[in-house]
Amino acid sequence: MVIFNYETDFQLENELEYEQWIDAVIESEGKEPGEINYIFCDDEYLHNINMQYLNHDTLTDIISFDYCIGDLISGDIFISVERVEDNAKDYEVSFKNELLRVLAHGVLHYCGYKDKTEDDTLLMRSKEQEKINMFHVEQ
């Protein structure tokens, strides 16, 4: 079950479409969807979480807390809508494309993908694009 929570004025249009896509992303990795909470927030909200739980004094677009048990994918994924907007401009992509990348990024971490090394980051980016491409495929 995917649940969308909003700590900012941002609101997804057609949550069901995103929920079905996220489930398909997880299943495409041979995993089972559990309970995933997406919390959309602003920079200040996410910065406070970054400081409190990770002791990082930086802005970020996403922080995920992994509650997976085996192949059952569950967790809380916090997304700064402000960072997504800025990243979309920086990478010269649409807001929706960057949002899909970040939404997929969180669950890909839960599926075992990392992004600490250059090789891991390249694989993560490839997987993100693969999952973005799935968004408009009929489920």
Image (cartoon, helix red, strand yellow):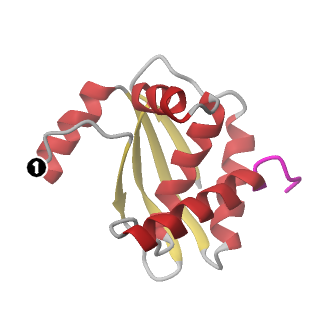
Q: Which residue is mark 1?
A: 55
Above or below 104: residue 91:
above
Q: Residue furthest bottom?
A: 70
Mark 1: secondary structure = loop
Residue that appears at 77% across and 55% down: 134
Above or below 73: residue 44:
above
* 61 left or right of 124 in image: left
The quadrant holding residue 34 is bottom right
Q: Residue furthest top?
A: 9
* 43 left or right of 2 in image: left
Q: Which residues are magenta?
A: 134-139
Q: Position of residue 117 (x, y in %)?
A: 35, 70
Q: How many discs mark residues in the rendered view?
A: 1
Residue 114 visible:
no
| Magenta stretch contains residue 49 | no
* 47 left or right of 33 in image: left
Q: Residues within 10 Å of mark 1 (few under 14, many from 20)?
A: few
Above or below 30: residue 83:
above
Q: Position of residue 85 (x, y in %)?
A: 49, 26
* 49 left or right of 96 in image: left
Residue that appears at 22% across and 35% down: 47
Give amino acid for label 1. Asn
Residue that appears at 51% across and 60% down: 107
| Residue nearer the viewer, 123 or 83 | 123
Q: Position of residue 27 (x, y in %)?
A: 68, 71
Residue 55 visible:
yes
Image quadrant in which the N terminus is located:
bottom right
